[in-house]
Image (tube, coloured by chain):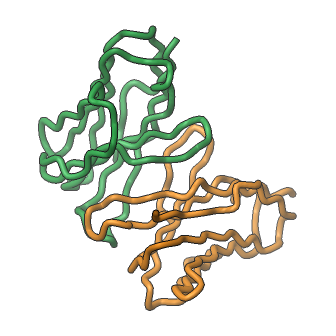
Amino acid sequence: SQKIEQNSEALNIQEGKTATLTCNYTNYSPAYLQWYRQDPGRGPVFLLLIRENEKEKRKERLKVTFDTTLKQSLFHITASQPADSATYLCALDFSGNTGKLIFGQGTTLQVKP
Amino acid sequence: DTAVSQTPKYLVTQMGNDKSIKCEQNLGHDTMYWYKQDSKKFLKIMFSYNNKELIINETVPNRFSPKSPDKAHLNLHINSLELGDSAVYFCASSAGLADTDTQYFGPGTRLTVL
């Protein structure tokens, strides 16, 4: 069955370092992959969408890569700040143009000052 | 202006009761969703509507019934509440059903069944 896996263990890094989060998926070849941020007690907020032919996408301090051979996406936050502390979710539309997103379980990032 | 709003934010009720959660979006989107996030933080889709038409109906007990009176509203009614229904329920909307149509989430409704 189709599956998305993110590292469920929290990631703790020092302010100013680069945080790298991983999203792996199986049994599917998605055309798009999305990343969301979720703060405690709030709904997820969309960050970035990357297409299969884009390999890499950037937005300010955020960078996402998409390796369809490895079936993996990496999400990087450079020059991390304590305000970046949150849970980051990757999501795929497994059903093709149905709006049905399957989310990974998320990785919690803690940036320490 | 709040893009996607839900009421109530907290809902505490007894087992066996019937309750509703309301959702409204002012983004002019065609598609709305209900998700359930359990204690382990897994976010799972329950339903979606596109232009008031039911598109996605996951394997959700039929005690859960969504209702979309118009494109801007998608309410969730739950009958005979059970302990296992305790979770955070998120409403979301998107412009449409395309893969590139990102979803905008509401603030969530924390349901506690006692």
Q: Quadrant of residue A8?
A: bottom right
Among the 4 quarters of the image, the one containing residue A78: bottom right
Does residue A36 appear in this view?
yes
The residue depicted at 41 percent of the width and 77 percent of the height is A30
Location of residue A87 in the rendering, given as x and y in whole percent from the top left corner: 64, 53
For the N terminus of chain B, give its image quadrant: top left
Residue drawn at x 38%, y 48% is B45
What percent of the width, then of the height, locates residue A51?
Answer: 43, 82
Q: Tell me: B41 left or right of B37.
A: right
Q: Is residue A51 left or right of residue B93?
A: right
Looking at the picture, does residue B113 appear above or below residue B51?
above
Q: x%, y% of residue B112?
A: 51, 20
Answer above or below: position of B90 versus B80.
below
Which chain can be seen in orange?
Answer: A
Q: Which chain is green?
A: B
- Locate residue A11: give its quadrant: bottom right
Determine the residue located farthest toward the front in the rendered image. A1
Q: Nearer the viewer, residue A93 or A20?
A: A93
For residue B16, side relative to residue A62 (left or right): left
